[in-house]
Image (tube, rainbow, N blue to C red):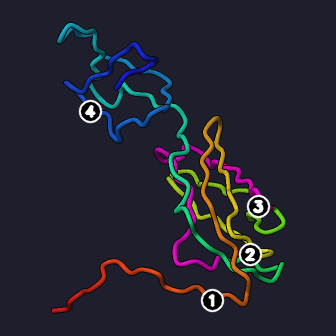
Amino acid sequence: FIVNDSLIVDDLLYLISPFPTTGERFESLTGVLNWRHEASKLEPRSVDDVMAGPPMLTEFGPDGMFVQVQNPVAATLTTPDQLTVTLSRAATEDTFVSIVSSDGASLVVQNDGVTISQGDTSAEVWLQGLQAADSVTLTATLDTVSLDTTVQVLATTVQPTLISLTPETTSTP
């Protein structure tokens, strides 16, 4: 990978795992400076040469989820999958990710976000549907990274229906 558009960090001696994602920050990178293939490359020697910066927000979803309108005091999620925020690596301390709804009259986020506990990489987001809406955009933000997902709020009279099933057929032994 390349740091600041100029420093190539190579894996000849040590492969950083998990592999850094675009935009990831480091407190420090140390290693042997090597000249190979007509380029200077930094060769970290071990995990001790890599001091990662704070984890960053990498995922928010899945997109296109739904909740049903609920009693205003019940903050329950009614969807087959759980909405989650995910970090690039385990949180080094309890980390709050703020989440804003584009339509606060239709959908609110419990506690205006979620706290990812120290040592965890993700946390579930709890929503409360207040009134039906075809599409509400939720924006999760941590430091300078913001990610969006959409949620549909169904009226209590609407029952979700299956529109596809994958795989279409299965067999049992």
Query: Which residue does the numbered mark 3 point to in the structure image?
Result: 111
Q: Which residues are magenta?
A: 77-103
Q: Amino acid at mark 2?
A: Ala
Q: Quadrant of residue 8?
A: top left
Query: Which residue does the numbered mark 4 point to in the structure image?
Result: 15
Viewer-side label of 2, 1: 1
Q: Residue 154: x percent and y percent? A: 69, 79
Q: Residues within 10 Å of mark 2 (few under 14, many from 20)?
A: some
Calculate the distance from the C-alpha at mark 2 to the C-alpha at mark 1. 19 Å
* The N terminus - image quarter: top left
Comes first in the chain, label 4 or label 3 = 4
Q: Secondary structure at mark 2?
A: loop
Query: Which residue does the numbered mark 2 point to in the structure image?
Result: 75
Comes first in the chain, label 1 or label 4 = 4
Q: Residues within 10 Å of mark 4 (few under 14, many from 20)?
A: some
Calculate the distance from the C-alpha at mark 3 to the C-alpha at mark 1. 27 Å
Closer-to-camera residue (73/54): 73
Q: Residue 42: x percent and y percent? A: 30, 16
Query: Which residue does the numbered mark 1 point to in the structure image?
Result: 159
